[in-house]
Image: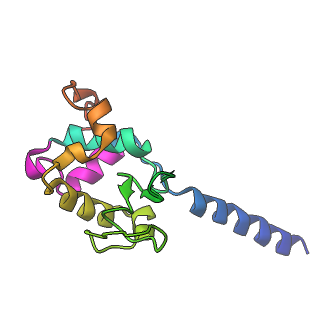
Amino acid sequence: MKSLLTLLTLGLLLLSITVQGRTYSRCAMAKTLKRFGLDGFHGISLADWVCLAKSESNFNTKATRFHHEDQSTNYGIFQISSRYWCNDHKTPGSMNFCRILCKDLLKDNIWKAVTCAKRIVKDPLGITTWEGWRTNCENKDLDQYIQGCGL
């Protein structure tokens, strides 16, 4: 009986960890984004990308934010919108320009989120697509986002 209780407790613990997702540290985020080729991608500095991820999701892979006005949801580390970029099977008129399921943007491995973000910055609005970047990163000294990370 004790071992069954232990297994159930362990299972609940693992389930809670899975639901929470991964929250990167600042330097882990910088290193991951650099490894995935975002440093200088489309003329955007690594510090800008790290600031964007901090501003949009606080580096949390499972972050979501619902918008009542247009019934869309933003997903993942970059808060990518179901209105234009991914399909969540809930947003009316979703464009799904990244040709991706929104749930794939909530994974701890952020490769698909990075791939979609690369597609987004090729759009005419570029990185200014993200309100969090415009508010928190644009025209600011962003050195703090990559300092001390050994890049």
Q: Position of residue 62 (x, y in %)?
A: 49, 56
**57 sits to left or right of 111:** right
Q: Is residue 63 left or right of residue 37?
A: right
Residue at x-position 91% and y-position 75%: 1
Q: Is residue 127 left or right of residue 84?
A: left
Location of residue 122 by image quarter: bottom left
* Vertical position of residue 4 compared to residue 108: above or below: below
Instruction: Farthest residue to the left: give it.
Output: 43
Quadrant of res 150: top left
* Residue 103 percent coordinates (x, y): 45, 69
Magenta stretch holds residue 111? no
Q: Is residue 108 visible?
A: no
Residue pushed farthest right?
1
For the record, the magenta segment spans 28-44
The residue at 19%/62% (across/down) is: 119
The residue positioned 21% from the left and 57% from the top of the image is: 120
Q: Position of residue 49 (x, y in %)?
A: 24, 44
Q: Nearer the viewer, residue 5 or 102?
A: 102
Q: Where 107 falls versus 28 (above or below)?
A: below
